[in-house]
Amino acid sequence: MLVKERMSRPVITVHPEMPVQEALNLMREERVRRFPVVDRHGRMVGIVSDLFKIFLELLGAREPGVRLAMLVPNIPGELARLTKAIYEVGGNILALGTFLGESSQNREVTIKVDGVEKEILIAAVQPYLERIVDIRGNLRIPRVPELSGPA
């Protein structure tokens, strides 16, 4: 048996600037476990695998809502103040992860929130941030159940 008899064709590639969540969605759609990563000249610069699925599941990637990545000062109580601000505007925190920031003075916090409009979410968390790194997604509008019977 030869490699050419077992390889996938056509080759589906991703680029380094593609959000990981998009790459994982593409993996799911194409039923593959890895993609070559190519630069703008078509040169392979790496490989991305479905191990990121675990990472994204931890961050609520398949949940509806807004995913917000931000730099937060690394001071005691700041994360509690941030999550309280989200709660106070009606946000439901679906997932939250903290990672090393740009220095020891901050942390990157990635949070998935539902139940609050993107603009309101940004305004609520802004006082507790150094800056927003990335924001994606849309608010899921909850379906209002229909009432049966006479009005």
Image (cartoon, rainbow, N blue to C red):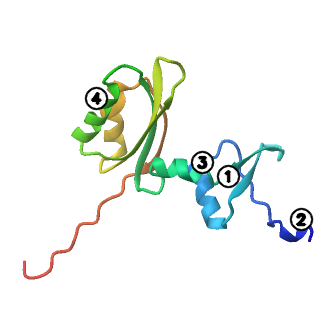
- Three-letter code, disc 1: Ser
Q: Position of residue 90 (x, y in %)?
A: 24, 45
Q: Position of residue 19 (x, y in %)?
A: 59, 46
Task: Name the N-terminal-most of marks 1 and 4.
Answer: 1
- Three-letter code, disc 3: Val
Please, what secondary structure does the residue beneath circle 3 have?
helix
Residue 49's tag is 1
From mark 3 to mark 1, how far is it between C-alphas? 10 Å
Q: Residue under circle 3?
A: 20
Relative placement, left or right, of 50 versus 80 is right
Relative placement, left or right, of 39 versus 23 is right
Quadrant (top left, top right, bottom left, bottom right) of the N terminus: bottom right
Crowding around mark 4 (Cα neighbors within 10 Å: few <14, some 14 to 19, many 20+) is: some
The answer to whether any part of residue 112 appears in the image is: no
Residue 81's tag is 4
Crowding around mark 3 (Cα neighbors within 10 Å: few <14, some 14 to 19, many 20+) is: some
